[in-house]
Each structure stands twice: as structure tokens, then as C-alpha cells.
Image: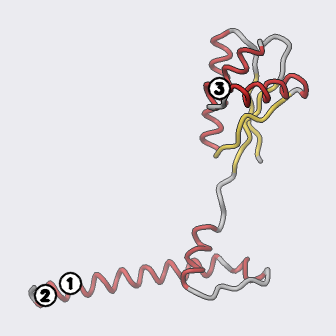
Amino acid sequence: MTEQTSSQIKNLLSQIAESRWQAVASAVDLTAAHQKNGQSVKTVQEAEFLMLAADPPPVYKVVLINDDFTPMEFVIFILQHFFHLNLDESTRIMLKIHHEGRGICGVYSKDVALTKVDQVSMAAKNAGHPLQCIMEAE
């Protein structure tokens, strides 16, 4: 290895180390709220963990709404096909929708919940049923 190559490697490693410490400093800044609540950050690993776990993404409930026209069998099909529930769980949720007016099919990230709502709405429309599917913030 030449002296120039060795010097370049040392510079690169130095830049990587500096970048890592800047990220850790940012993580420590992000933990100010934790410190206000009586918690403190004692190690670099804690700071990195808090930076990664600071704010979990919001989740949304996907909900089916009861109507007087959509057959129970179709609701069970929807629950099995789009939410990958077994027959017993699908039947339980379908009966909850029937008796209580609404039922939660699952809890997902925003993008997945939007996709599920679109898939169910399109399937219901294509089958000629007025079944409504909505999403609500958890």
C-alpha cells in the first residue's frame, strides 16, 4: 500500500467517524424531551437508540361499515381475501359489523391502510355492493 493510499484511507475513516459523531450529537439533541421527563441519556448507544425509536409512524384502523344490502358472505370474503383472516376471525368480525354497525379489520401504516380501503371499495363496487370501508387514526 502506498503512503498516499494509506493517507486517503485515514482521511476517509476520519470523515466517517466525524459523520457518526454528528449523528450521535443530533440524537442527543432529539432526546431533550426525554431529559425533561426525568430521563437521561448515559451512553452513545442510548442516544442512537432514542434517535431511531423517537417517533414511531402513526397507524390507522381500517374499518368496515354495516349496511342493509351487502351479503354477510361477501363481507367474510373481503376479510379473508384482503385482510388474510381465517374463517373464524372473519366471521367474528362480520358479526360485530352486523350487530354493532362497524368493525375493525386491521391496523396498518397510512400507506397500507389507504391501499386496503381502495382495494375493498373497488371490490365492493365491482360486485355491486354498497359496502363502505374507511380508515381512522389510531
- Residue 96 vertical placement versus 22 (above, below): above
Circle 2 Cα neighbour tier, 10 Å, few/some/many (<14 / 14–19 / ≥20): few
Q: Quadrant of residue 116?
A: top right
Pinpoint residue 1: horizontal percent, then vertical percent. Answer: 10, 85
Q: Which residue lies under the disc numbered 3?
A: 80
Q: Is mark 1 in CB contact (under 8 Å) with mark 2?
A: yes
Question: Rounded to the nearest whole Å, what is the CA distance between mark 2 and mark 3?
Answer: 64 Å
Q: Give the mark nearest the N terminus, 2 or 3.
A: 2
At mark 1, the secondary structure is helix
Circle 1 Cα neighbour tier, 10 Å, few/some/many (<14 / 14–19 / ≥20): few
* Foreground: disc 1 or disc 3: 3
Left or right: residue 86 compared with residue 104: left
Q: Residue furthest right?
A: 100
At mark 2, the secondary structure is helix
Q: Amino acid at mark 1?
A: Gln
Q: Nearer the viewer, residue 22 or 71?
A: 71
At mark 3, the secondary structure is helix
Question: Rounded to the nearest whole Å, what is the CA distance between mark 1 and mark 2?
Answer: 6 Å
- Residue 52 vertical placement versus 118 (above, below): below
Residue at the spot 59% in from the left edge and 72% down from the top edge: 51
Q: Nearer the viewer, residue 9 or 64?
A: 64
Q: Which residue lies under the disc numbered 1?
A: 8
Q: Which label sits on residue 4?
A: 2
